[in-house]
Image (cartoon, helix red, strand yellow):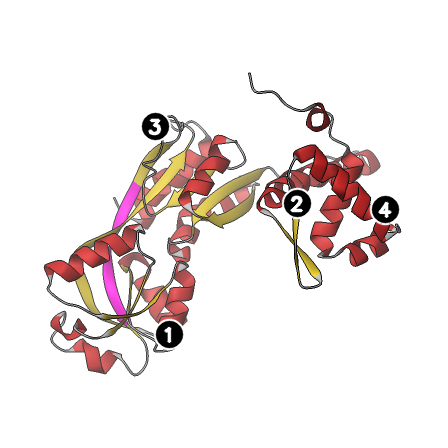
């Protein structure tokens, strides 16, 4: 059995509240004005909390404070604790239960955000009565959150294939063919003689090692084309924003082709035949039983991805 220090088992919620206010306000000075306390008092209380958890909760950047890695974890718990406390206060005042159940989803930073939105749309259906919370991060970090029961589900463009001791399961939702897009000033130049026209063409790609990048590199090799990589971008939305300004060509899923062209003012110059972006729901359940997760997966397969 893992030993838990006495100070952590009996957490001082006053210390946690001071930390929470400082994190939300972004500085001790602003937090002090809200709490009506001196900076020395607040600093001392946060130091005691840091001693309890055994790690710094803030890093100083200029005159401000930003949460450390441990601080981010503690902040998520603090948000839940004080949000629940506020709901309790409203109930005691009115006698009516308020608030909605929360469904927490992790989204990998490489996945197209428009695809993630369509997959998760059932959560935002008014009839579900559920409040959606989305966290974006790397897949390995999101898996840690799922296994710690701080997330209910992960939406990813790659299956988790890490430590076999980690109890999560991949549920394939479907796939989408890939198109190549070009912004203003590039579409006419690179539309002809596709895909050979991509030789030397400026290209925006996901970072090395990501699922789409691996498939894209294979497709370049099979078609014997060597584009000029001008940027590697982890965030899918940022990559499209660069592309919309004419920084380079980029690849994205057919399933959101019309929306991409409308939102970013780009055009399709060709199809990466045989290249697909895959989509997965990753959960702590081998057989999905949670009704909302089941609805998300079934609708994604039937209506969004058509698998």
The quadrant of the rendering that contains the N terminus is: top right
Alpha carbon separation for disc pair 3 and 4? 46 Å
Alpha carbon separation for disc pair 3 and 1? 41 Å
Q: Do callouts 1 and 4 mark residues in contact (Cβ within 8 Å)?
A: no
For the residue labelled by badge 2, is the local secondary structure a helix, a strand or a loop? loop
Residue at position x 53%, y 41% in the image: 104
Which residue is under mark 2? 57
Residue closer to the observer: 7 or 236: 7
Q: Is residue 297 above or below residue 205?
A: above
Which residue is under mark 1? 244
Give the percent coordinates (x, y) of residue 212.
28, 54
Which residue is under mark 3? 164
N-terminal of the pair, mark 3 or mark 1, is 3
Residue closer to the observer: 218 or 296: 218
The residues colored magenta run 173-181
Q: Is residue 171 above or below residue 30?
A: above
Which residue is under mark 4? 41
Alpha carbon separation for disc pair 2 and 4? 17 Å
Alpha carbon separation for disc pair 1 and 4? 50 Å
Alpha carbon separation for disc pair 2 and 1? 38 Å
């Amino acid at each position: 059995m893992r030993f838990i220090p006495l100070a952590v088992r009996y957490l001082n919620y006053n210390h946690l509240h001071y930390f929470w206010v400082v994190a939300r306000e972004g500085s001790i000075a602003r937090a002090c004005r809200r709490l009506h306390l001196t900076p020395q008092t607040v600093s001392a209380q946060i130091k005691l909390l840091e001693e309890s958890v055994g790690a710094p909760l803030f890093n100083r950047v200029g005159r401000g404070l930003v949460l450390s890695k441990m601080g981010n974890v503690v902040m998520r718990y603090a948000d839940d604790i004080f949000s629940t406390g506020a709901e309790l206060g409203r109930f005691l005042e009115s006698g009516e239960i308020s608030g909605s159940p929360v469904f927490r989803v992790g989204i990998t930073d490489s996945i197209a955000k428009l695809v993630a939105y369509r997959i998760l749309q059932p959560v935002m259906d008014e009839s579900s009565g559920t409040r959606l919370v989305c966290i974006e991060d790397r897949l390995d970090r999101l898996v840690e959150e799922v296994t710690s029961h701080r997330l209910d589900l992960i939406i990813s463009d790659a299956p988790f294939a890490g430590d076999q001791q980690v109890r999560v399961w991949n549920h394939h939702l479907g796939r989408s063919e890939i198109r190549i897009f070009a912004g203003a000033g590039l579409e006419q130049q690179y539309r002809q003689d596709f895909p050979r026209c991509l030789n030397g063409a400026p290209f925006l790609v996901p970072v090395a090692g990501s699922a789409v990048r691996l498939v894209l590199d294979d497709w370049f090799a099979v078609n014997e084309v060597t584009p000029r990589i001008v940027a590697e971008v982890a965030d899918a939305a940022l990559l499209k924003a660069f592309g919309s300004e004419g920084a380079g060509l980029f690849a994205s899923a057919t399933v959101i082709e019309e929306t991409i062209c409308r939102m970013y003012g780009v055009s399709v110059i060709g199809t990466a035949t045989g290249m697909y972006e895959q989509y997965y729901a990753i959960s702590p359940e081998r057989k999905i039983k949670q009704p909302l997760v089941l609805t998300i997966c079934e609708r994604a397969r039937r209506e969004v991805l058509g698998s």
